[in-house]
Amino acid sequence: MTLPGPRPDLGLREGYHSPQVEVPVRLNTNESPLPPPPEWRARLAEEADRIEWNRYPDRQATELRRALARFHRVRPEQVFCANGSNEVLQSLCLAYGGPGRCVATFEPTYALHAHIAHLTATEVVEGRRRADFSLDLDEVRDVVAAREPVITFLCSPNNPTGLVDDPASVRAVLDAAPGLVVVDEAYGQFADWSALSLVDDSVPLVVTRTFSKTWSMAAARLGYLVGPAGVVANLERVALPYHLDSFKQVAGRVALEFVGQMEERVALIVRERQRILSAMGPLAVTAWPSQSNFILFRPETRKGDEVWTALLDQGVLVRDTSSWPGLAGCLRVTVGTPEENDAFLDALREAL
C-alpha cells in the first residue's frame, strides 16, 4: 500500500514561513511588541465566562460584525470575518478564483497573495513595480488588459517595502482592473491613508484588515474584510460552517472597546519607526521610507545574508528578504520596543 500523492499542480510548493529562533530580540514577524492592555484581558475573561462552550458559535459572527461595522461606519453585511486575514484572502480566492482563472500581483509584495492563489488552483500573473518599489500604473494596465484577472492584489502599506499606494493609484487600478481589487491593509493603521474610504456596494473594491498588528492579538488569528455586501455574501458561501469560534469572536468585539489604548500603541510604534530611520541615516545602508510597523533596508558594505547572520550572532533576529523578487541583499526589521530597537541599532552598527 502507498500513500496517494498531492494533486499534480500543487507539487512541492513551499509554505510561507519565517525562521523562529530563540533570541533576546525577535524582530522578524511584524508582531506588535506590546501586549494588549490589561483592561482588555479582564473584560475578555468576563465575557469568556459567559460563553456556552457546549454550543456551536454564532455562524454569522453577528456581534463582531456589528462592532466592526460601527468602527468603520459601514453596514454589518459589508463585513466578513475569518481566522486571520490570510483566511480572508483564501476565501476570496475560493469564491472568485479556481481553474481557468487568474489573479494579478505586482512584485515585490506580500508572498501569500500568490501562494494562496496557487493553493486554490488559480493562476498567478506577476507584474513588476518600479525600481523605487512604487506602483507602475502603465504596468498595471498592461497586465490586467492582457490577462483580465478576477482579482488584482495590492498591499498597502506594502509588505515588505512599507510603501503606501496613494489614492490616485488605487482609483486608477479600479478603473483598469476588470475584476475585484483587493487592498491588503494588514498594516493600514500605521499609514496616513486607507482605501476604506473608497468602499461602496457599487465599487469592486475590498479592503482586508487584521487584529494581529495594531490590536496586539497575533495569537488570536483574527482578520476581516470590508467590501460590497454582494462580495461578502459570496464569501459566506465558501466559508466552512462555524469557522470562527466563539472565543475569537468575543476577543475581537472586546478589543474594539479599547480603541484609545490601541491608538497609543500605534503612535509609539510610529515614533520608534521614525527614530530607527533617523538612526540609520548615517549608516552604510539604504533604508526605504515606511508607513508600516517595519523597515526594509539594504546593507551597502556587506552582503545582506552576512549582516543577517551577524545580527543573529548578537541576539537580534530580523527577516532575510534577499531571495524575494526584486529584493537582492535586503533585510526587514520589525519595529519593537524602544529597548529592542536600541539593541537592533547597536547590533547593526557592529554588523556593518
Image (spheres, rainbow, N blue to C red):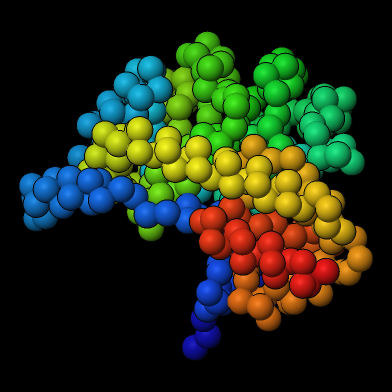
On screen, residue 155 above or below 345: above
Residue 251 in sight here? yes
Task: Name the residue rendered at 84%, 61% in the picture.
Answer: 299
Where residue 123 sits in the image (x, y, percent)? 70, 45
Residue 348 vs residue 24: left or right? right
Q: How many marks?
A: 0
Task: Give the farthest residue toward the bottom.
Answer: 1
Task: Name the residue rendered at 77%, 66% in the picture.
Answer: 349
Residue 174 in sight here? no
Residue 161, picture quadrant: top right
Give whichever of 88, 46 is nearer the camera.
Answer: 46
Where residue 275 sits in the image (x, y, percent)? 65, 47
Where residue 226 sits in the image (x, y, percent)? 45, 27
Task: Name the residue rendered at 27%, 26% in the picture.
Answer: 66
Give whichever of 72, 91 is nearer the camera.
Answer: 72
Task: Name the residue rendered at 24%, 39% in the picture.
Answer: 254
Give whichever of 286, 123 is nearer the camera.
Answer: 286
On screen, residue 343 above or below 38: below
Residue 59, picture quadrant: top left
On screen, residue 132 above or below 230: below
